[in-house]
Amino acid sequence: MAWCAAARTFHMPAIDVASLRPRAPLAVGIGCVSLAGRSGPSPPFASLGISTDAATPVLKEAVQTDKAPAALGPYSQAIKANNMLFMSGVLGLVPQTGKFVSDSVEDQTEQVLKNMGEILKASGASYASVVKTTIMLADLKDFKKVNEIYAKYFPAPAPARSTYQVAALPLDARIEIECIATLH
């Protein structure tokens, strides 16, 4: 039997294939799973696979500048992909020394945003092209201080943003910011 009895009543929602990608083949399947050691009918399953046209690969390029602190591990300062920029979390380190500018959240915030500016510039972007930021704070009580400095860097409309207090940050930083920007 080609179909499981239970799969006959399984309904797949309509998918607008044109919005996925031009010439993107679409494979949808409904079938049955065989589970070893299980008796009785197999549960139905559905799979949706979308493959992209090999002629239009995703372009992924690492961004690196000496004008911002180097990555502290096996990651890039930022990645450019499909006209978007995905920036890793940035700390308030002075690029030339690898040390924090100071222990104050205000100084670290200013340095983080300067470092982000250098990575944005190296990517061909700017503060105006940032669409989303995520701020991680060692202490959420610093929220107001950070906002005052942050507001100087991002023109209206300000990017979408999330802010969290976290248990710890690399090198005991007071703040870390990551962002997503558009590229033109």
Image (cartoon, grey):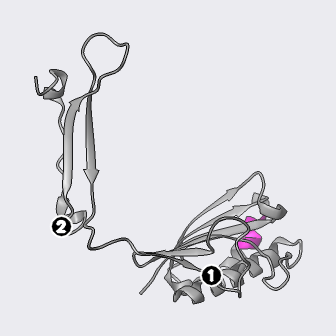
Closer to the camera in the image, 169 or 23: 23
Please name the residue that numbered disc 1 is placed on: 64
Q: Secondary structure at mark 1?
A: loop
How many dots with numbers? 2
Q: Quadrant of residue 35?
A: top left
Which percent across, then down, holds residue 129?
Answer: 49, 83
Q: Quadrant of residue 94?
A: bottom right
Q: Amino acid at mark 2?
A: Arg
Instruction: Report how far apart the C-alphas of labels 2 and 1 lie in the structure.
Output: 34 Å
Q: Which residues are magenta?
A: 142-146
Please name the residue that numbered disc 2 is placed on: 23
Q: Amino acid at mark 1?
A: Gln
* Residue at left offset 24%, top offset 15%: 41
- Judged left or right of residue 53, residue 126 is right
* Residue at left offset 50%, top offset 80%: 157
**Label 1: how many Cα within 10 Å (few below 14, some 14–19, many 20+):** some
**Label 2: how many Cα within 10 Å (few below 14, some 14–19, many 20+):** few
Between discs 2 and 1, the one toward the N terminus: 2
Q: Let me know if residue 59 is in the magenta part.
A: no
**Mark number displayed over residue 79:** none
Which percent across, then down, holds residue 39?
Answer: 31, 10
* Residue at left offset 21%, top offset 63%: 24
Which percent across, then down, holds residue 155?
Answer: 56, 85
Which percent across, then down, holds residue 182?
Answer: 45, 79
* Residue at left offset 69%, top offset 62%: 136
Q: Quadrant of residue 106?
A: bottom right
* Quadrant into which the N terminus falls: top left
The answer to whether any part of residue 155 appears in the image is: no
- Above or below residue 12? Residue 25 is below
Q: Secondary structure at mark 2?
A: loop
Outermost residue on the top side: it is 39
Main secondary structure found in the magenta portion:
helix
